[in-house]
Image (cartoon, helix red, strand yellow):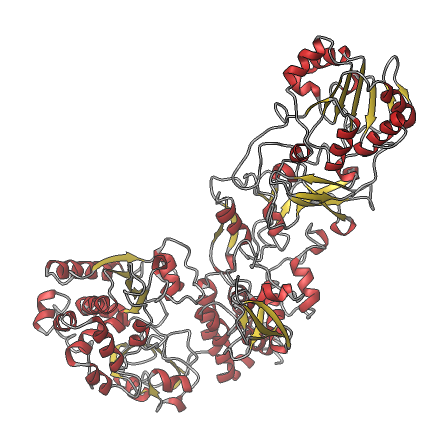
Amino acid sequence: MTKILTKHFDEPKLHELETYRSLGGYKGLEKALAMAPADVTAEVVKSNLRGLGGAGFPTGGKWGTVPPLDKVPGPRYVVVNADESEPGCFKDRVLLTRAPHQMIEGLLIAAHAIGAKETFIFIRGEYQNQHDIVAKAVKEAEAAGYTGHASVKLMRGAGAYISGLDTALLETMEGKKAWPRQPPPFPTVAGLMAKPTVVNNVETLSMLPFILREGGDAFAKIGSAKNGGTVVFSVSGHVEKPGVYEVPMGSKLRDVLALAGGVRAGHKLKCVIPGGTSMPPLLEKDLDLALDFDSIRAAGTFLGAGGMIVLDETADAVEVAHNIERFLAHESCGQCTPCREGSYWNEEILERLLHGKGTAEDMPNMTRVGENITGKVICALGDTVGVVTRAYMSKFPEDFKKRIPNG
Amino acid sequence: MAKRVKFKLNGQEIEADEGRLVIDAAKDAGVEIPHYCYHPALGNPGNCRMCIVEVAGAPKPQVSCRTAVREGLDVKSDSEIAKRAQASALELHLVNHPLDCPVCDQSGECGLQDYYMKVGQYQSQVRENKQHKGKRIVAGPHVMLDQERCVLCTRCTRFVDTVTKTHELGIFGRGHSERIEVTPGKVLDNDYSGNVVDICPVGALTDRDFRYKVRVWYLDKTDSICPGCSRGCNISVHTNTKRPWHNDGKRVARLKPRHNPDVNGHWMCDEGRYGFGSLDADRLGRVLRMTPQKQDVSWDTAAGEIAAGLDGAVAVVASGMLSNEDWAAAKSLFAGAKFYFTPEPDQVGAEDALLKKKDKVPNLKGAENMGLKSGSFDELAKDLEAGKISTLYVLERDLGQIWGEDKAKALVAKASLSVFQGPNKCAVSESFRYRLPATAYVEETGHFTNCDGKVQEYKKALDPIGEAKPDWEIFGLIAKARTGVPA
């Protein structure tokens, strides 16, 4: 299978500049710097690269909404979202550990494309080790003279899940409470310090060196329609070989499962959470689903950040839903009421179910409240609060019913 | 001028400025969309999700406090989708809200109660335990905080962040354990702290001066003007006459600011808000001749006797508390007399950039506009000392605070006729020959001219005490006794 990001992961010293350069590193940046910024963006548009942090927004399209320098002069920024915090996702962690230069090169390409003179890498607080590795790599890149056109600064999160959302991340960087903003204006128009800001995920930026080196068309060819290149899955749960697997966009769910060694021996598949715990699960019948942003959306769930959690028949849907809702209730930022109160309410009802004290009204009530939350909140976390329990209730009603005495 | 555009609200075409928020445009058209977090002076964070409306063409319902009016916009605030979204937002607001309405001071003017009757009216489905947070937290000298009742609309934190810029309140914690707290090391003790009680849509912030004194539905509300300084903030006087045994027997329960974009916006200062405490203290209610012995006389007798003494050298000491009507009548009655009404030294105080003005009386501008000039109190003292003043007429002013009590009493005694007229007793009011009861500003209708020359009406909220009359009416009686026609 074609690999882009993890191609050289067998090199033990890939995180060092010399090794990275010997494998063609920073060639993409050199090529980009020789091009006009608009041409760099055009190449990325051609590549069909989608935002791999979860939203799947076309990256070139996002850059295109940054107002041009001659219309809106003044500073503009690129921010790397390395606040990977979705339960089930650990691909950015691996990318930062093994190939920090790949991301830094991508970041510097992006900075050139939008005319940013300052860039920031916002690393999750818990990623101490990764922070140190990236900091060292940034020093190497600076010493090698790659940061002439744009400086790179590192910032660390303080532990809030919601900081992984672009606008909450920007609030955090400004020293405020991580409360998501409500666009418009979008960050590309008024982001960090109200200046035009592109926020891109680690994986997205890491794709850029390849796109510049080999061309946007070559990248687009690897993936499926409108979903260029590859995607990195973090596979965990009840599989034989949990780990990080890179596959072309549009690969089948069955193939990714096979890479991870399949469901653990002696058990059979119950469901697969495709993109991290916030996404509704897929069932055995979905195994031939093509894994790209558009196909998976048509199946009623999301590719998210590729945090694939595989569950076998030993998992109980009520326990799973409770676990996720407890997490969401804990991580809800508390800004808007439906999410703040709804996550608490759902968690409490599910906890009651876990203790066998469910009532016949609980399921219809959770369905009703969930419907009332989704689409009426400020950010995606709130939407999730309304979606997750409903998804598990509709896919595994038996698990819920058996928790309800006389139900 | 913003462009006027047409848009549809609940099927009706209405006209509004382009870019105006739908929630405001709807209010202009007489449609109230429920909301907690939005406040015209504090912005639209859109966190309460109460003002959700259906917008044709939008993929999901929108919050009307963040939707701008544009040509052809089609908004429904009363469709099934919108009504359901509003009811559900309210339901979620109440998941952790204590059911303590019967003992909550906000009852009767609570956003949760009001909107429950308007858009809620569902059976509660909550079987879970409610979150417990802090109760009865003293936030400052005027404000009590109850975190359990809070709906986290953040109006109060935005007020202390953007209006007073004092940052005494903040949002602490996360998710359902999030709460408003007093910033560590601070006390909610700025000059405008009472306003957070007004903007709090629920019973989370209550007024320590007012709470548990009287139920709000027993109060009568009258439009008035704050007499605390020359700004002339528009206020509402809330009076308690239906249950006189409540509110510690006091007639005025509280003062609230009234919105006037040209004068005070939405706010008033604490000095003005809590300045009504002495309103009914030591009130004068009887018409009295004090010498040779204290004796009740009729208004006509007093007016006749005073009228006879107005031919000599008359000095009128007044306060900026007089209404324009009073000033006009005084000017006519005391033609040829010398006036003394400068606010210094006893009627001046602190000034700030927001509302508070230096002159702590409401209507000096009225006297100025009438062409009246004030002499200095030093000069008056000299003239009294030298026996140059035969009649001293004092209006609502405590000479003791100007000259000191003993000196004031001695100087009053120098005049052959002395009259004190006002609503409240003061240190030297008993030393005058006549003591006449005047109404307080809440007992009369009149006009004040504020520091910017704006003439504003204040209305009668209460009946006068005893025989008290407005100053202008008393002047009329004296003028009639003197010339046969009222002033």
- Indicate left or right for B180 with B198 as reference: left
Quick check: can you spot residue B388?
yes
Judging depth in this view, the residue of B185 and A224 nearest the camera is A224
Residue at 64% x, 43% y: name it: B454
Whether A118 is drawn above or below B265: the answer is: below
| Rendering coords of residue B403 (x, y %) | 66, 16
Whether B355 is drawn above or below A10: the answer is: above
Judging depth in this view, the residue of B308 and B104 nearest the camera is B308
Quick check: can you spot residue B298?
no
| Rendering coords of residue A157 (x, y %) | 33, 58
Judging depth in this view, the residue of A296 and A280 nearest the camera is A296
| Rendering coords of residue A202 (x, y %) | 26, 69
Q: How many marks?
A: 0
Whether A353 is drawn above or below B335: the answer is: below
Whether A263 is drawn above or below A111: the answer is: below
Residue at 34% x, 67% y: name it: A188
- Indicate left or right for A93 with A138 as reference: right
| Quarter of the image that includes the C terminus of chain B | top right
